[in-house]
Amino acid sequence: MQRRIALLFALLWLLFAVTAAAQTDTAGNEPGSELQISLLTFGPGEIYWERFGHNAIAIRDRRSNEAVSYNYGIFDFEEESFFLNFLRGYMRYTIDATSLERDLAWYREEGRAVLEQELQLTPAQRLALRDFLEWNLRPENAKYDYEYFTSNCSTKVRDALDRALGGAIRRSLETRSRGYTYRLQADSLLAPIPALMLPMDLGLGPYADKRLSFWDESFIPAEFAQHLAQVQIDGADGKPQPLVVATRVLSTANANLAADENTWLRRHGPYPIGYAAPVAVVSLALSLLLFIAARSPRPRAALAFALAAICFALAAGLSGLVLAALWLLTEHVSAWRNANLLLLDPLLLLLLPALWRTRRPNWHSGRATRLLAGLVLALALLALAIKVLPWFIQNNAVWIALLLPPHLVLGWRLLKR
């Protein structure tokens, strides 16, 4: 009987030893301990869609010497109806995995800065992260709905890391803020390309002006890297320890990209948000010249006024149609309820014939023209009036400063009997 009990204990011990061996690698470590997890942050590129930068999760397997880069920034211009879907706000991006060395070589060739932050995860968390990314790579899981500010290549990387850490990143970042907004961050990044920055700022509505937490700011890869360096997690002894255990600069930006980051507009932000006063001075001066031309009895001055007024009304009216379409016909939520529509009024297009007739010395406005001109002017003044309302948060003072003075001159000319 004793021999049978001893044999039973021996079998149980052998089973335990086999199970323990299955749960460790050849070095006696936990599964996942062979993995090294890093966040890669790539600086802005020269092409406009690269201005926000990019990031990826790098996983190195020290046992197999395999290194993989996972990123969520893949889109395809050749996709059916890509540009139509882009305009409508129905963009579909996908995750991809490539050789880390090949990925790094491509960014170095592009001359872009690359920063690596090695992260301190437990073996179980490393394994869970890799398994999740591999699950995400499956064709049925790979695509996601892209949105500039809330669902992009950086927020998906952030969410994947936060998921593996049980929400530690979100708990650390969502309670902290420095008062930045989506508009402020986007303007700053696009400052080296004013021809793109200004129309984008004009098209952003109040959604872009809400105060952001560090968690929200992480839609920008460089900001996420900066905030991640401040995250503390619980160590094995229960004491807080930094999530980032090592930071390495893998490459620096080339001369052209470094110069972009040092441009005057990039260094003297916020732009155009903080420039309402000088813009108002310039706009008032130009509008004064327009007013003088409108009052002049000379035919050439009247013609100059008519041409300038038509150019303003045509540009403003067509821009207003674009803003209205972004609000009513697309899923670009950051463009909805844009108060700049009060200044860029599509009704201005109906006033084009009357503005052209102002070149005649004996022209007088009719009742319909005066009613329409009065409505356009009232809406433009409303853009200024609602700035005092506490629930109005859209930061469009610079556009009011630019567009309201010419509205006043056009309204005066068309309302005059």
Image (tube, rainbow, N blue to C red):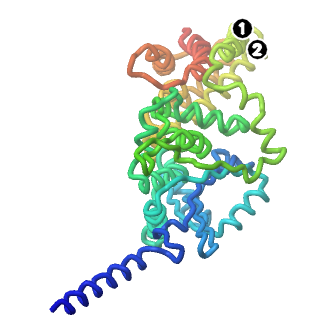
Please state the horizontal and vertical placement of residue 299, each as a whole percent of the image. 76, 14
Left or right: 149 as drawn, with respect to 305: left
Mark seen at residue 243? none
Task: State yes or no: discs 1 and 2 in contact (Cβ < 8 Å).
Answer: yes
| Residue 230 vertical position relative to residue 31 in the rendered view, above or below | above
Q: Nearer the viewer, mark 1 or mark 2?
A: 1
Amino acid at the residue labelled 1: Ile
| Secondary structure found at label 1 | helix
Q: Residue furthest front?
A: 2
Judge whether residue 61 can be spotted in this image: yes
Residue 75 is at least partly visible in this image: no
x and y percent of residue 337 in the render?
A: 43, 33
The picture places residue 366, in percent across and down from the top left corner, at 51, 17
Q: Quadrant of the C terminus?
A: top right
The answer to which quarter of the image holds residue 386 is: top left
Q: Residue at x 42, y 48 (%)?
A: 237
Mark 1 burial class by Cα count in 10 Å: few <14, some 14-19, many 20+: some
**In which quadrant is the N terminus drawn?**
bottom left
Label ID, residue 301: 2
Q: Is residue 404 left or right of residue 128?
A: right
Residue at screen point 54% across, 24% down: 396
Q: Earlier in the sequence, mark 1 or mark 2?
A: 1
Residue at the spot of label 1? 292
